Image (spheres, rainbow, N blue to C red):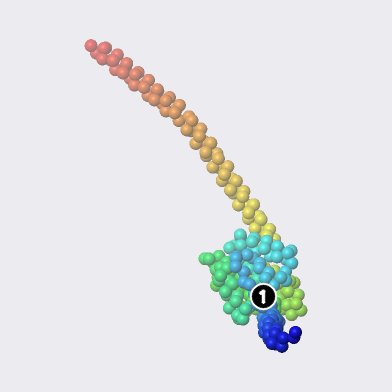
């Protein structure tokens, strides 16, 4: 038998069950762009490394090259040249963002303050170079702007970020090599030669220390014998002197 009240109850339940589901689906669809935007916000590097490609625009080969050259520069001079790529800046001005990364990672030597940061924000079509105070005279804001305009802007404008970063990094590295008197052989070769020289000096010092230690051991071994010999010789001299004195005394009587 058809129950009209039961039918109405079922329709009521279906209506109140469907509405929340539809609302949830609409919320997901509406919030999806926001979620994607959050996912695309830049995650700032949280450790001091020479290259942080958070925008995924650099190949492994380019990253390895930057890492090797910056490490060599750091070993030779204490200057740290760092490259950071991001998608977005999270609503910050690019200078403020760069200063935040620079200060948090403490780029450069603490005393010389000679760090240099290249920041590229691909999705915001922006870039910036920030130097430590110790480099402000040698690498002024004006000179950095000119270098970026020459080396990065043409490739950046066409979306060829990797090539632009490579050219700009090379220009920044060349400026630092000139500043610190690194000749045309390049920072990697210079660092390798400096390391080889240091190893040679350390080996020479180690040999000297080994020789001194050997001499010390020999002296420690011979010292008791020498002391015994000297003591015996002194005792013999004393006995001889006593005999001579006794002989003179008998002669006097």
Quadrant of the drawing holding the C terminus: top left
Snapshot quadrant of residue 34: bottom right
Residue at the extreme left: 253
Q: Nearer the viewer, residue 103 or 21?
A: 21
Q: Residue at x 33, y 19 (%)?
A: 241
In the rendered image, residue 125, in percent from the top left (x then y), is placed at 69, 80
Residue at the extreme front: 1
- Can residue 200 be seen? yes
Q: Residue at x 58, y 78 (%)?
A: 96
Q: Nearer the viewer, residue 231 or 15?
A: 15
In the rendered image, residue 76, in percent from the top left (x then y), is placed at 61, 60
Q: In this figure, which residue is indicated by the disc labeled 1? A: 39
In the rendered image, residue 137, in percent from the top left (x then y), is placed at 57, 74
Please tell me whether residue 19 is drawn above or below residue 72 in the rendered image.
below
Q: Nearer the viewer, residue 28 or 170?
A: 28
Q: Is residue 110 left or right of residue 165?
A: left
Q: Is residue 44 left or right of residue 253?
A: right
Q: Is residue 225 left or right of residue 1?
A: left
Snapshot quadrant of residue 43: bottom right
Badge 1: residue crowd in 10 Å (few <14, some 14–19, many ≥20): few
Quadrant of the drawing holding the N terminus: bottom right
Give the total number of marks visible in the rendering: 1
Q: Residue at x 26, y 15 (%)?
A: 249
Q: Is residue 247 left or right of residue 185?
A: left
Q: Determine the secondary structure under disc 1.
A: helix
Snapshot quadrant of residue 251: top left
In the rendered image, residue 22, in percent from the top left (x then y), is placed at 70, 83
């Amino acid at each position: 038998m058809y129950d009209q009240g039961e039918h109405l109850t079922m329709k009521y339940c279906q209506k109140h069950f469907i509405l929340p589901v539809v609302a949830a689906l609409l919320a997901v669809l509406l919030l999806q762009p926001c979620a994607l935007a959050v996912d695309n916000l830049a995650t700032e590097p949280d450790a001091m490394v020479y290259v942080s490609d958070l925008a995924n625009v650099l190949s492994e080969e380019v990253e390895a090259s930057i890492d090797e050259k910056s490490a060599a520069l750091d070993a030779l001079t204490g200057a740290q040249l760092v490259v950071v790529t991001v998608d977005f800046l999270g609503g910050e001005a690019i200078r403020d963002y760069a200063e935040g990364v620079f200060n948090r990672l403490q780029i450069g030597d603490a005393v010389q303050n000679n760090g240099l940061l290249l920041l590229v924000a691909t999705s915001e079509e922006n870039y910036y170079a920030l130097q430590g105070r110790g480099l402000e005279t040698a690498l002024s804001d004006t000179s950095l702007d000119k270098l970026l305009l020459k080396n990065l802007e043409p490739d950046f404008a066409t979306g060829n970020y990797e090539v632009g970063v490579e050219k700009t990094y090379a220009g920044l590295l060349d400026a630092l090599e000139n500043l610190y008197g690194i000749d045309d052989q390049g920072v990697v070769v210079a660092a390798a030669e400096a390391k080889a020289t240091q190893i040679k000096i350390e080996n020479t010092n180690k040999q000297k220390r080994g020789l001194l230690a050997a001499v010390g051991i020999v002296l420690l071994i011979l010292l008791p014998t020498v002391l015994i010999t000297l003591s015996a010789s002194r005792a013999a001299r004393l006995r001889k002197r006593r005999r001579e004195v006794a002989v003179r005394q008998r002669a006097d009587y």
